[in-house]
Amino acid sequence: MTADALSILSSIAEEKVFGKSNQVFEKGDQGSSLYIIIDGSIRIHDAYDVQKASKTLAILKEGDFFGELSILGNESRSASATAVDDSVLLEIGQEPFHRMLMENFDLSKNLISTLADRIRQLTNKLQD
C-alpha cells in the first residue's frame, strides 16, 4: 500500500500489537476486519486440522494486508494468521472499511488489483 493509502486507513483503524508466534486469527473464525502490517511479518497458513502440519500460504510483510475475504464477503476466515516476529498491525472494521471504499476510488482499485494478483499466484501454485 502507498503512504497516502496508509494515511487514509490509519484514520479509521485501531493499532494492535502481536508478539512473535501469537495468533491473529484462526481458520474458521468469524471475521469482520482487515489487517494492515505496519511493522513485522505475518504467516498466513492452513491450520484447520491441528493433527496435520500447517501449510504456509504466504509470508506478508510491512505494507501488506490480509483478512480481505472476510471483510468483503462476511465469511469465516479461510486461513489462519500468526505473527512471525513482533508485529504492529492496523485493524479496520467492516463498516468503516466499506465507507472508505465508496469514498476513495484509488484505494478500491488497489485492493481489487491486489486480490487479482493473489488469485493468480494461488492458481499458479495449485497448477505446479
Image: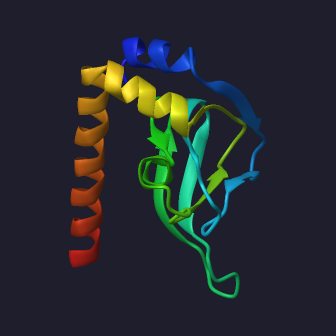
Horizontal side of 82 relative to 113 (left or right) equals right
Residue 83 at x, y = what percent?
67, 48
Q: Residue at x 57, y 21 (%)?
A: 12
Closer to the camera in the image, 49 or 30: 30
Res. 122 image quadrant? bottom left
Name the residue rendered at 49%, 51% in the picture.
59
Quadrant location of the C terminus in the rendered image? bottom left
Q: Position of residue 74 (x, y in %)?
A: 49, 56
Q: Position of residue 29 (x, y in %)?
A: 65, 63
**What is the basis of the colouring in this image?**
rainbow
Number of on-image labels? 0
* Left or right, 109 with reference to 37: left
**Left or right: 90 with respect to 58?**
right
- The answer to whether 14 is drawn above or below residue 75 in the figure is above
The answer to whether residue 123 is above or below residue 74 is below
Specify the quadrant of the image occupied by residue 125. bottom left
Q: Is residue 128 visible?
A: no
**In the image, is residue 119 above or below residue 4?**
below
x 58%, y 41%: residue? 41
Q: Is residue 21 visible?
A: yes
Q: Residue at x 75, y 46 (%)?
A: 20
86 on left or right of 63: right
Farthest bottom residue in view? 51
Estimate the x, y position of residue 90 in percent, counting from the top left. Answer: 61, 29
Vertical arrangement, residue 35 with respect to residue 124, above or below? above
In this view of the protein, which residue sits in the foreground, 58 or 102? Answer: 102
Question: Looking at the rendering, in which quadrant would you find the N terminus?
Answer: top left
